């Protein structure tokens, strides 16, 4: 069975945020819905784009959205900047959720990540329509 970015997002929405572990999992899955959506649309192009400096795949994707989508696909620069920033911000929250276990995460962080992921996917879809 294969999964897609919407599966990650829908699962993240169903996770109970009544516990801190639920909040952490919702943030993490929300981020992966964003990353997998971008990777599904632009992953191969991102890997082949020599103008993107050698970094990890997640940083490369944010850079590709910010730097290459406006240049290669002629998408609005301000929108691409915003999408890249959203991806990076939720990635940082995902990193905190997964690795900074001694710092409490509040329920609101899950809602912000979920709303950001929903808006990100909607905006990414609007670029290709």
Image (tube, rainbow, N blue to C red):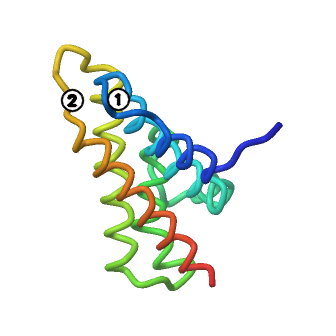
Task: Name the residue rendered at 50%, 73% in the picture.
Answer: 69
Query: Which of the 4 quarters of the picture holds residue 81?
Result: bottom left
- Name above or below for residue 59 compared with residue 69: above
Task: Name the residue rendered at 44%, 44% in the picture.
Answer: 31
Measured as percent of width and height from the top left, residue 26 is found at 41, 37
Q: In the shown orientation, is residue 110 left or right of residue 6?
A: left
Answer whether residue 64 is visible to the viewer in this image.
yes
Query: Which of the 4 quarters of the picture holds residue 38?
Result: bottom right
- Name above or below for residue 36 compared with residue 118: above
In the displayed orientation, state which residue is furthest to the left: 103
- Name above or below for residue 69 compared with residue 46: below
> 88 or 113, which lies in front?
113
Task: Using a 10 Å C-alpha cutoff, classify the residue at mark 2 as few (fewer than 14 neighbours), some (14 to 19) or many (20 or more).
Answer: many
Task: Name the residue rendered at 41%, 84% in the picture.
Answer: 76
Answer whether residue 54 is visible to the viewer in this image.
no
Measured as percent of width and height from the top left, residue 107 is found at 24, 37
| Tag 2 secondary structure | loop
In the displayed orientation, state which residue is furthest to the right: 1
| Tag 1 secondary structure | helix
Measured as percent of width and height from the top left, residue 67 is found at 41, 68
Viewport quadrant of the C terminus: bottom right
Task: Name the residue rendered at 25%, 42% in the picture.
Answer: 109
Instruction: Indicate which disc, 2 or 1, sits on the residue closer to the N terminus.
Output: 1
Viewport quadrant of the N terminus: top right
Residue to which mark 2 is pinned: 105
Q: CA distance from mark 2 to mark 1?
A: 7 Å
> 30 or 68, which lies in front?
30
Q: Are marks 2 and 1 in contact (CB under 8 Å)?
A: yes
Task: Using a 10 Å C-alpha cutoff, classify the residue at mark 1 as few (fewer than 14 neighbours), some (14 to 19) or many (20 or more).
Answer: many
Q: Which mark is residue 24?
A: 1
Query: Which of the 4 quarters of the picture holds residue 116?
Result: bottom left
Measured as percent of width and height from the top left, residue 28 is found at 42, 35
């Amino acid at each position: 069975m294969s999964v897609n970015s919407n599966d990650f997002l829908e699962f993240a929405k169903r996770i109970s945020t009544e516990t801190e572990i639920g909040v952490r999992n919702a943030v993490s899955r929300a981020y992966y819905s964003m990353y997998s959506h971008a990777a599904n649309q632009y992953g191969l192009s991102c890997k082949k784009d020599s103008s993107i400096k050698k970094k990890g795949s997640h940083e490369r994707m944010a850079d590709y959205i910010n730097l290459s989508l406006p240049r290669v696909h002629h998408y609005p620069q301000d929108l691409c900047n915003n999408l890249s920033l959203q991806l990076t911000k939720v990635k940082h929250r995902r990193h905190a959720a997964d690795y900074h276990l001694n710092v409490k995460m509040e329920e609101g962080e899950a809602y912000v990540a979920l709303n950001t992921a929903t808006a990100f996917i909607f905006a990414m879809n609007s670029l290709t329509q």
